Image (cartoon, rainbow, N blue to C red):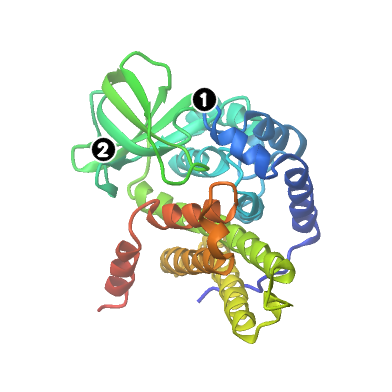
Amino acid sequence: MSLYSPGIDSEEQAALRDSVASLLNRKADSAAVRAATMAPERYDRDLWSTLCEQIGVAALIVPEQFDGVGASLTEAHIVLEELGRHLAPVPMLGSAVLATSALLLSGDDEACTATLPALASGEKIAALCWADAAGWRETGVHAGGGILSGTAHYVLDGESADVLLVLAKSGGLVTLHQVDANADGVTRVPNPTMDPTRSLTTITFDDVDAVTIPTPSGIEDNLRAIAFVALSAEQVGASRAALDLTVEYTKSRKQFGRVIGSFQALKHRMADMYALTETAHSISYAAVDALVNKAPDAVQLADSARIYCSEAFSHIAGETIQLHGGIGITWEHDAQLFFKRAHGSAQLFGQPRESLERLAHAAGL
């Protein structure tokens, strides 16, 4: 079992966290987030540019040889947690973590040299095309002779992407391919989503010429683990924000002549929310630590973090709605945004029962 001391950032990590938090407090308040979700591309272009230029968030996991910072997934995890606090609609998860990781996992220096510097600078955004209509168990695109056909569903940041990295079926294998997002034969259709802060796109490939990137077998399993762990960081940050929102409300709302936060029953419920947030934080950071250090239980911890953090965030978001009373479900209040993010994220990258099945299989059950 991988060991991690939660809540202990190094000096450099603490500085990174403070820098990101300070910038988001200035530029990603509720009004800015809501405005970005209504923009044509459904993400905050100015915020993303600032995060890339001033802090270098897109370059964190990119090695220095490809013009990156040469940090690790742990540093990206810290950024994702802070972004989750604000529900900030920027392509950190889709481009700077998943698509970038796909290129790095390929181990192909030529492909990395050609693409990663532009992603690291924030000049370009990449999207990872993966799922079929049923979810992330299978790819929705087929490859033959360097030609792609089929449809990738639920593509993160697909509307704003300049580069598409495509997991495709090729014979009995899953292979990786790169396509210009504006190439002939590529059709992008924005998906309506329950969570307005998370843009998803359906991308269809109609006999599209693609560059095939040599890739070791099992890349989809490694990407799935990275996706689960990265998503858990967002869930932890959003859980903290929802808890803070609830505590502040119960300290000001009065009923029967007293602030409702003084009622013992509500104190117990908020204590449970706090405990869930802290334990979710622990397993999330244990999981990323296992990935970074290639621990033997890394895949199992990724599945565990995916299940636990999804359930914890869903419960905390539900309690946030309940403890805010009738205003919690109104469009004008942010509680409903956290509730929608919680339930949308719980289904992202596949249903939690799929992780349970893998854990049961690994345990021989």
Q: Would residue 211 be seen by someone viewing this image from the given angle?
A: no
- Closest to the observer: 256 or 202? 256
Q: Left or right: 207 with respect to 281?
A: left
The percent coordinates of residue 208 (x first, y second) are 30, 19
CA distance separating discs 1 and 2: 26 Å
Q: Quadrant of the C terminus?
A: bottom left
- Closest to the observer: 159 or 129? 159
Nearest to N terminus: mark 1 or mark 2: 1
In the displayed orientation, state which residue is furthest to the left. 171
Q: Which residue is the site of mark 1?
A: 40
Looking at the rendered structure, the kind of residue marked 1 is: Pro
Q: Which residue is the site of mark 2?
A: 140
Q: Would residue 248 be seen by someone viewing this image from the given angle?
A: yes
Looking at the rendered structure, the kind of residue marked 2 is: Gly
In the displayed orientation, state which residue is furthest to the top. 184
- Closest to the observer: 190 or 349? 190
Q: Residue at horizontal 27%, vertical 41%?
A: 132
Q: Left or right: 239 with respect to 206?
A: right
The percent coordinates of residue 335 (x first, y second) are 57, 56
Q: Left or right: 205 with respect to 182?
A: left
- Give the secondary structure at mark 2: loop
Q: Residue at horizontal 61%, vertical 61%?
A: 242
Q: Residue at horizontal 52%, vertical 32%?
A: 42
Q: In this rendering, which labeled residue sits more in front, label 1 or label 2?
A: 1
